[in-house]
Image: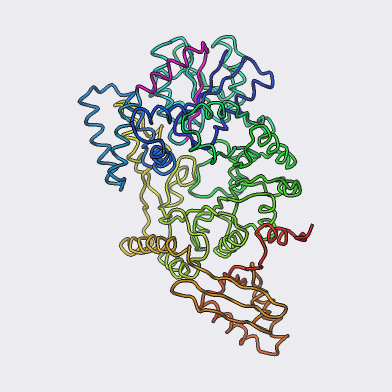
Amino acid sequence: MKLVLVAPPWNNLYRPSIQVATLAALASEGHGDPITPVYAYLDWFEFAVGSLGCSPEEFVTVYDTIGEELYGLGVGDWIFGGALAASGAQGEEAARAEYAAFLREHGVAEELVTRVLGLREVAPRFAAELAGRLVATGADCFGFTTSFSQLVPALAVGKAIKDRAPDRLVLLGGANCDRPMGQAVMHAYPFVDAVVQGEGEGAVAAVSAAGSVADLTAAPGLVLRHEGALRVSLPTVQPATSAPVPRYDGYFERLRALPWSELITPQVALPFQMSRGCWWGEKMQCTFCGENGSGMVYRSKPGRQLTETLRTLTERHGVFDTYAVDTILARNDNGLSALADAEVDITTFFEVKANLGPKELGEMRAAGVTMVQPGIESLSSGALKLLRKGATSLHNLRFLVICQELGIDAQWNLLSAMPEESPGMLEEQLRLIPFITHLAPPSTVSKVRVDRYSPYFEKPDDFGIALRGPEKKYQYIHSGRDVDRSALAYSFEHEQTVRQADDAEMLALRRRLGARVGLWKKLHGQSRFSFRFGPEVTVLHDYRPHVGTGRYVLRAGDDQLFRSLVHGGRLMQAVGQVSEMTGTTEEQVHETLRTWAKRGWIHLEGKRGLVLALRDGMRDELGRALELRGESAQR
């Protein structure tokens, strides 16, 4: 079958769709008929600018906000819902008024609400025009990748295709179609002919090679509408090596043809994938995480393929910024050492576990990793234990310290309101934050959600959680009367059935935490806390707003004690060495540690301590990375 794969809005403008590009690359390996990728989100960008009559510079911001920040309110999906509704003019007017009120209740600015309403009005015309162009290609099957806010845009275009050409197949895949959600989509939207549950390579290869629908009844992971019923084939777990290097030629061809492409091109980063699943989730899944769905089993490509993949992508497309879509960086054979040795000017991003040490982070920076998303989630060890993060507050603080030293942008979030959270967990973070304003603040502070596939969702009783149905946004996204929103939803309303603390007290503490993080963000740019080593002396510069104590010179035992806790050290060993060197008692050394902890110079946790100041070694970040990696900066 001739197959067209569509990446609908609201895919990130600056990222070619790795899902579409990877599956399209199967055709270059000789599997079946040609596969054509369509980057419809770039078409939508051009269409919306023209239809709204706004400047492209303004709409870039609107698009990014809807796609990246307002997913939790269902905005991107709702905009395309008008193409599916059959409620008439009066019903549409009521739907617009209700949803606008919903957005205002959640603090969305009036100007943006107006833009959302305007986009809803023009989206059906876009879906119709795109469907017309797709049908004109003569393709037999149209496949849509759907994750985050892409489901309803895909449905809107799919319905328009079936209205024009009922004999063509409409196929959906991606995160919104995993396990029961995919079959729920087919029940709710009868024009969808098939969905792919799980990974798509096997199913897409089968579609491409098929001569007719009858050839698809056993395609792996495919749920097919066949002979009046749904024919379900179980998905298969693909080895990571089965995925070809994505081909992004179609994205760049469309981008070059896009007016105002200069607004997007400088920020483009090429997605790639080295692994699937999560090795930590296999061992102990984080309580709130439903990200991997049915694909938790961890599989990784050999590390040597990292350099090969990035060379292929960057040389083919002339873009040196790259972006790993892996859930988590491989522990051992991850290829970073070879990439660092390659001495190329490629930059990249990885999601990582936050208990990485100096050597690992030094290697990452030497390999060109300039941005990471660590699973920090909290600065309270007690809360981290509740979340099953497998890390402590000291691990997370050490990670932030080293990233700041190396110029690695750490993008992280702070979570609260998890089951069994105590006032003490919030209070310890409130006390800590004024001392770490020189470190990267969290992007957001939010309550823990209950998402499908997470332990909170799968076993709510184990955590004292009562599920109360899908989040409210789904009544706007899927507005049909006979729609089973519980089967379609990914995020759910919930309440805790076991009260561990006074609700009013916890609410007040969470509000204080949010306010303190807001102040952290404001102060971060002016906060300075660093030290420099001399031969036998350390000079400390403490200019953190509100808590800074100025300049200090540490000598003899204080110098030795401070050095022993840089990037973390064992307290017993440090205290013993300083006591022996200076002849002071161990209690006197412990008193020094307590004084430093009160000043926020160090963080103490159990048997370990960590200097919170940043080393200002008068070297560039790469030189510092090479030092931490264990190499000489002089090569």
Please state the extent of the stretch shown in magenta in the rendering.
Answer: 125-147
Q: Quadrant of residue 181?
A: top left
Residue 386: x and y in percent read 49, 57
The residue shown at (68%, 61%) is 624
| In the image, residue 370 above or below residue 78 | below
The residue shown at (66%, 80%) is 559
Is 614 inside the magenta-drawn segment?
no
The residue shown at (71%, 61%) is 628
Q: In the rendered image, which quarter contains the N terminus?
A: top right
Residue at the outermost right position: 635
Q: Quadrant of residue 627?
A: bottom right
Residue 594: x and y in percent read 55, 80
| In the image, residue 279 above or below residue 126 | below
Frontmost residue, 24 versus 53: 53
Q: In the rendered image, which quarter contains the C terminus?
A: bottom right
The residue shown at (68%, 30%) is 242
| In the image, residue 276 above or below residue 410 | above
Is 315 left, or right, of 97 in this rendering? right
Frontmost residue, 586 versus 494: 586
Is 465 left, or right, of 121 in this rendering? right
Colour option used: rainbow
Residue at the outermost left position: 90
Is 43 left, or right, of 596 in this rendering? left
Residue 236: x and y in percent read 61, 28
Residue 553: x and y in percent read 61, 82
